[in-house]
Image: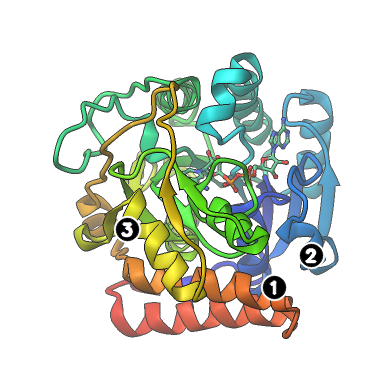
Amino acid sequence: MFNNIYRGKKVFLTGHTGFKGSWLSLWLTELGAEVCGYSLEPNTEPSMFKELKIEEKISKSVIGDILDYKYLSETINLFKPDIVFHLAAQPLVRLSYAEPILTYETNVMGSLKVLEAARNCPSVKAFVNVTTDKCYENKEINRGYKEDEPMGGYDMYSSSKGCVEILSSSFRRSFLQEDSTMAMATARAGNVIGGGDWALDRLIPDCVRGVNAGKNIEIRNPIAVRPWQHVLEPLSGYLLLGQKLLEEGKGKYRSIYADGFNFGPNEDSVLTVAEVSKMACEFYGKGKVIVGEKSPLHEAGLLMLNIEKAKKVLGWTPTLTAQEAIKNTIEWYKHFYNKDIDMYEFTINQISSYADLMNKYSVHCF
Ligand SMILES: NC(=O)c1ccc[n+]([C@@H]2O[C@H](COP(=O)([O-])OP(=O)(O)OC[C@H]3O[C@@H](n4cnc5c(N)ncnc54)[C@H](O)[C@@H]3O)[C@@H](O)[C@H]2O)c1
């Protein structure tokens, strides 16, 4: 897969103790990569990182702060990666209202420090910078945003990621030019679901917590529309982007891949919060969704992504419907709580089933 580019490659992954980072650690390891993760300790209890013993599966797991430039830089230079996937962030909208400084420091200054450390490490040829669909100035319009639309963000999380996009573009123009050996792309994905996420104030983890506690699932914003996707969908986009950047080789600073890319679902997977939570309960076979009090904190009502660029330039396409994504997610949690299966094996099987489907249906040139 991915033209076998990751076999034997050294990959530096920030945010490996988090939800997406745990899945990406496992997928990269399956692809034959040597992974060095760099993150804070897992911030949920339970966490996929601890439950699946990911520390033992990857080559090196470093607990460190991306804001600690000296340690970050030393760790990168010691490992000498070929490619960096930067996922570490404060990724929660509601927490960003309570912790604006932490959110901006982590997301904006943290990203700048990871970029700068990578630029100063001669082995790094490619950098995939993970932002979000929320980086766009959301005008609540009834169509998907294209990559060249203005950055923005109402809340501190969204605007911090809009800043990361602006910073990345400036960084590319300022430093990643003729004499640079590193090419960098940004990846903007939508609302991601999948097993192993226990973050606060996220819909599926909230549903799972409600079902397991025998409580009603209270949703705040039933008609809000989001581009829902299984976690493996954007990760396949990140990996494809990384492949393309690596294949271009040194000196290809003007690569068409060194740019921003949206990774979202097809239009039929753009569902409301109420639809997703009800589907989750159906697959669980239990749980009751009720509409709670609307939060006083602003949250976007309508958000969609246009994915034509990723389709045309990268040959990427979504593989699962929203229904399949929710089913796979709920199966993961059911097994986890039933304790009836080895969750590491089950997760690896979900990755290989997804990869088989991708090869079957997609137009990628893996
Ligand atoms: N989950 C989603 O729905 C979603 C959607 C769009 C974009 N994203 C983006 O994807 C990335 C991963 O998100 P996630 O859902 O896995 O989040 P997560 O909270 O599960 O993981 C965040 C990771 O960042 C690390 N981290 C946070 N602050 C750090 C610091 N100062 N130094 C080092 N590490 C630090 C944490 O330790 C953890 O490993 C983020 O950049 C997020 O903005 C997520």
Q: In the rendered image of this protein, does residue 262 appear above or below residue 196?
A: above
Q: Earlier in the sequence, mark 2 or mark 3?
A: 2
Crowd tier of the residue under label 3, counting other residues whose Cα lies within 10 Å: few below 14, some 14–19, many 20 or above = some
Q: Quote the CA–CA distance across marks 1 and 2.
A: 9 Å
| Extreme-left residue of the structure | 142
Q: Which residue is mark 3?
A: 275
* Label of residue 51 in the image: 2
| Tag 2: amino acid | Glu
Between disc 1 and disc 2, the foreground one is 1
Q: Residue type at mark 1: give it.
A: Phe
- Along the viewing direction, whichever of 341 and 311 lies nearer the viewer: 341
Nearest to viewer (mark 3 / mark 1) = 3
Pinpoint residue 138: horizontal percent, then vertical percent. Answer: 27, 28
Q: Residues within 10 Å of mark 2 (few under 14, many from 20)?
A: few
Q: Is residue 173 visible?
A: no
| Label 2 element class | helix
Query: Mark 1 = which residue?
Result: 336
How is colour applied across the structure in the image? rainbow
Q: Earlier in the sequence, mark 3 or mark 1?
A: 3
Chain-order first, disc 1 or disc 2: 2
Q: Tell me: 334 left or right of 338.
A: left
Q: Are marks 1 and 2 in contact (CB under 8 Å)?
A: yes
The one of 348 and 69 positioned closer to us in this rendering: 348
Q: Position of residue 298 (x, y in %)?
A: 39, 23
Please give left or right for residue 19 compared with residue 311 in the image: right
Q: Secondary structure at mark 1?
A: helix
Q: Secondary structure at mark 3?
A: helix
Q: Is residue 229 left or right of residue 207?
A: left
Rendered location of residue 332, percent (x, y): 59, 73
Q: Specify the quarter for ligand 1.
A: top right
